[in-house]
Image (spheres, rainbow, N blue to C red):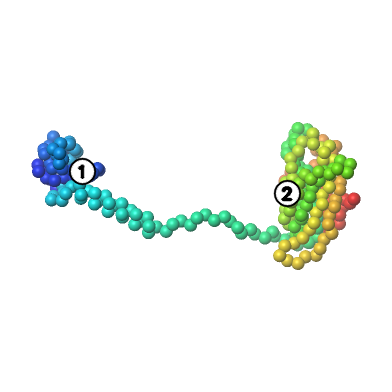
Amino acid sequence: MIEMKIGDKVRFLNEIGGGRVAGFQGKNIVLVEDEDGFQVPMLSTEVVVVGDEDYATSHLVEVKQEAKSKRLEADDEEPEPEAKPVTFKAKPMERRGGDRLSAYLAFVPIDAKELSQSRFESYLVNDSNYYLRYVYMTGENNAWTVRAEGELEPNTKEFIEEFGREDLNALEHCCVQMMAYKREKTFLMKPTVNAQLNVDTVKFYKLHAFRENDFFEQPALIYTLIENDVQKIKL
């Protein structure tokens, strides 16, 4: 480190400016006199001798060079690619024996241990290699109301709705219509399913009516709409 003496030109390290050393206060304070004759006390660690260079210009050049260097480093960095939405979707898996159409309407208690207080969920189950375009309706006399419609992928189940016992009367008479097909391949045409059924609402009060099954981890009340290409419930 260069030892400073009175008359040396210095610049400030942490801010723009500087001047000449006019004197010292103790071991650590330097009195820096600027161009207007004002003396500024500075820590000796915060000033540096610049010799015959102009202190202000020298410091400004240094700052500009540092900023330019940072810009160049930033330009050299490859921009991160923008996140793109995932558009790939795996094709549904087919299983052996799944070309025979099977579909079910299922009711599952949310809390089977407290059946008297539990609400329920309804599902459509597609146990086949076909897509199913479906409409789920409930009716009173000849007036029908669509409760859900959509498409079931092969070998999947789909949540329809949640309901309580206060809704059972509206669900007592229901109908599920379905059309089966496959995508991107040939297939055997299946007859359109038009399954009407009367739901026994008394069973929603009996725990033994909800049984273990292959589709849910908890017991469920399951109505067969079609099984192995044979429609179980017909008009």
Residue 73 as seen in the image, left or right of residue 129? left
Tell me the SS state at disc 1: loop
The amino acid type found where label 1 is placed reads: Gly
How many marks the image carries: the answer is 2
**Which one is in front in this view, the residue at disc 1 or the one at disc 2?**
1
The relative height of residue 85 versus residue 170 in the rendered view (above or below) is: below
Residue 56 in view in this figure = yes
Residue at image point 13% right, 42% down: 20
Sequence-first tag of 1 and 2: 1
Q: Which residue is mark 2?
A: 158
Question: Which residue occupies the extreme top position in the image?
Answer: 117
Q: Please give the label number shown on residue 17.
A: 1
Residue at image point 82% right, 52% down: 177
Q: Position of residue 110 (x, y in %)?
A: 73, 39
Q: Nearer the viewer, residue 221 or 4?
A: 4
What's the CA distance linking mark 1 and mark 2? Answer: 73 Å
Residue 42 as seen in the image, left or right of residue 209? left
The amino acid type found where label 2 is placed reads: Glu
